[in-house]
Image (tube, rainbow, N blue to C red):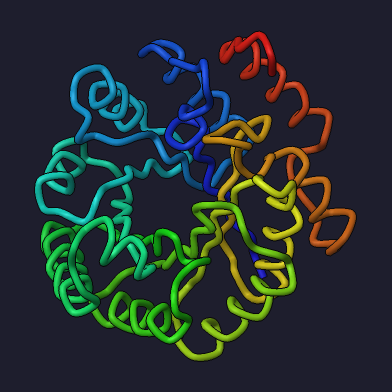
Amino acid sequence: MEIRIIDTTLRDGEQQPGLALDFNDKIEIAKLLNSIGIYQIEAGIPAIGGEEKKSIEKMVELKLNSRISAWNRMNISDIQHSIDCGVDIIHISVPSSDLQIAAKLKKDRKWILDRLKRCVYFAREHGFTVNVGMEDASRADLAFLLELCSHAFAEGAQMVRYADTVGILSPERILAEISYLKTAVPVDLGFHGHNDFGLAVANSLAAVQGGANYVDCTIGGIGERAGNCDYLQFMKAINGCLRLGIRPGMETLKSVEEEIMKIISVPWL
């Protein structure tokens, strides 16, 4: 099974406290990520507008080998901004836990499913590849996650991402849940882990063992709160623990990581 890395340094990674990347920083980081064969670069959120949107447009213009994706809330306005940028992949984040659906959005599950269908259809109608992210999946009802996967697949989504948004998973649980979803629905699965319990790498490995073939990482493990799955650590672990093999060599990965961390330049990292 081929494992594809989605690098989210420029989106989730930039939520690292004390970090603010400018236009040139983002373009240089994208070029460096491309140089090590990252499959997909999650370039940011076009709906923010301004320099954020311009940097994403520039990455698309560069025609890198890495595919450029953009993160969107589940609304047509956000998706239109991504369409304007001409990205390769439109990622639609779908609240999946009742905590988010009822408490934050004041909606119900039916509303989520209807909005998911509308948004995926809109992006697909414009000719875009769509990924769907199940936000806060680790606090969601597994039966509803299955329903979301089924609807996303039926509407033509290429991949569905299980997001441990608050970083509470154990390897045993993510292995079981990814295995269940992978068996039940014929859709590619991804995993987005946070490191609140220091388990982002371990959980990502378990997700791969369960059948996920996309894994989100950031350079240096930077990101919101305790950060995300560290790319270099994950690549070492997947080679050492699962014997899947990696390209390019570890020395190249380490060198590029060091270059990117110089650009990031947060004193306490």
| Image quarter (top left, top right, bottom left or bottom right) of the N terminus | bottom right
**Which residue is at a point 65% across and 67% down the rendered structure image?**
207
Relative to residue 90, is residue 173 depicted above or below?
A: below
| Residue 57 in which image quadrant | top left
Viewer-closest of 266 and 61: 266
x, y percentage for residue 64? 43, 33
Looking at the image, residue 173 sits to the left or right of residue 50; the answer is right
Residue that extends furthest to the bottom in the rendered view of this protein: 184
Locate residue 265 relative to residue 203 in the image: left or right: left
The spot of residue 10 in percent (x, y) is 45, 30
Question: Considering depth in this image, is 186 or 174 the residue closer to the camera?
Answer: 174
Find residue 32 and report its image quarter: top right
**Among the 4 quarters of the image, the one containing residue 103:** bottom left
Which residue is most to the right?
A: 240
Query: On the rendered structure, is 242 left or right of 207?
Result: right
Q: How many marks?
A: 0
Q: Residue shown at 79%/61% (left/top)? A: 244
Residue 245 position within the rendered picture, expressed as x and y whole percent measured from the top left: 81, 55
User: Which residue sits at x=30%, y=60%?
Assistant: 130
Towards the viewer: 113 or 84: 113
Quadrant where the image shows the C terminus: top right
* Left or right: 151 as drawn, with respect to 199: left
| Rendered position, 40 above or below 19 | below
When the figure is inspected, residue 41 is found, relative to residue 219, above or below; the finding is below
Residue 252 percent coordinates (x, y): 77, 28
**Residue pictured at 32% horizontal, 51% vertical:** 89
